[in-house]
């Protein structure tokens, strides 16, 4: 073996190591993404149903998605008035901009879904829906809508 071929083999070995490290990194990113999407799938579905019910003016359906705690804070009539006011403004396509779940041991799991909605009044709104897990079911704890 000549002295010239040894450095070439080392370079190829270095490239292989870099390639393997990169492949492992890509696999880890994919796994984390799959796990995160699986963890947020159920609360996202409830949040989407809640927002769609509000947008269509179905306050009763949206209220049914409230947690026990939320129902002690607002009556169906009070919530109906809110839906009547904000539902038509937020009645446009929404885009999820953030979703997260917190499942700390010893506490009820919580989730936060953030949407961006271009309102029918031409303003852009940020809508945050906070959820809590009651037993095995995700429920809406509260929501907030602000102009951007």
Image (spheres, grey):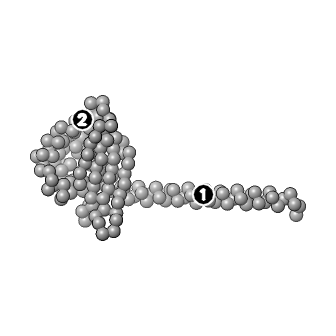
Residue underneath mark 1 = 23
Q: Which mark is residue 69?
A: none
- Please name the residue shown 27% across and 32% down the image: 120
Can residue 92 be seen at all in this image of the molecule? no
**Which label number is shown at residue 89?**
2
C-alpha gap between disc 1 and disc 2: 47 Å
Q: Whole-percent x and y of residue 117?
A: 32, 38
Closest to the observer, 21 or 52: 21
Q: Is residue 133 above or below residue 122?
A: below
Q: Secondary structure at mark 1?
A: helix
Few, some or many residues within 10 Å of mark 1 (<14, 14–19, 20+): few
Callout 2: SS: loop
**Is residue 126 shown above or below 133?**
above
Q: Residue at x 62, y 59 (%)?
A: 21
Q: Residues within 10 Å of mark 2 (few under 14, many from 20)?
A: some
Q: Which residue is at 67% across, 60% downward?
A: 17
Q: Earlier in the sequence, mark 1 or mark 2?
A: 1
> How many numbered circles are shown?
2
Q: Is residue 73 left or right of residue 107?
A: left
Image quadrant in which the C terminus is located: top left
Residue 38 in the image: state x and y as whole percent.
39, 58
Name of the residue lying farthest toward the right = 2
């Amino acid at each position: 073996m000549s002295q010239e071929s040894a450095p070439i083999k080392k370079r190829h070995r270095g490239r292989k190591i870099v390639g393997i490290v990169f492949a492992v990194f890509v696999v880890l990113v994919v796994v984390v993404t799959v796990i995160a999407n699986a963890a947020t799938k159920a609360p996202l579905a409830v949040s989407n149903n809640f927002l769609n019910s509000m947008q269509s003016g179905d306050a009763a359906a949206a209220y049914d998605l409230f947690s026990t705690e939320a129902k002690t804070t607002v009556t169906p009539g009070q919530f109906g008035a809110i839906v009547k006011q904000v539902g038509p403004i937020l009645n446009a396509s929404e885009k999820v901009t953030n979703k997260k779940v917190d499942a700390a041991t010893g506490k009820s799991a919580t989730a936060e879904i953030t949407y961006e909605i271009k309102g029918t009044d031409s303003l852009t709104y940020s809508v945050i829906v906070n959820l809590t897990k009651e037993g095995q079911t995700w429920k809406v704890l509260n929501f907030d809508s602000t102009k951007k």
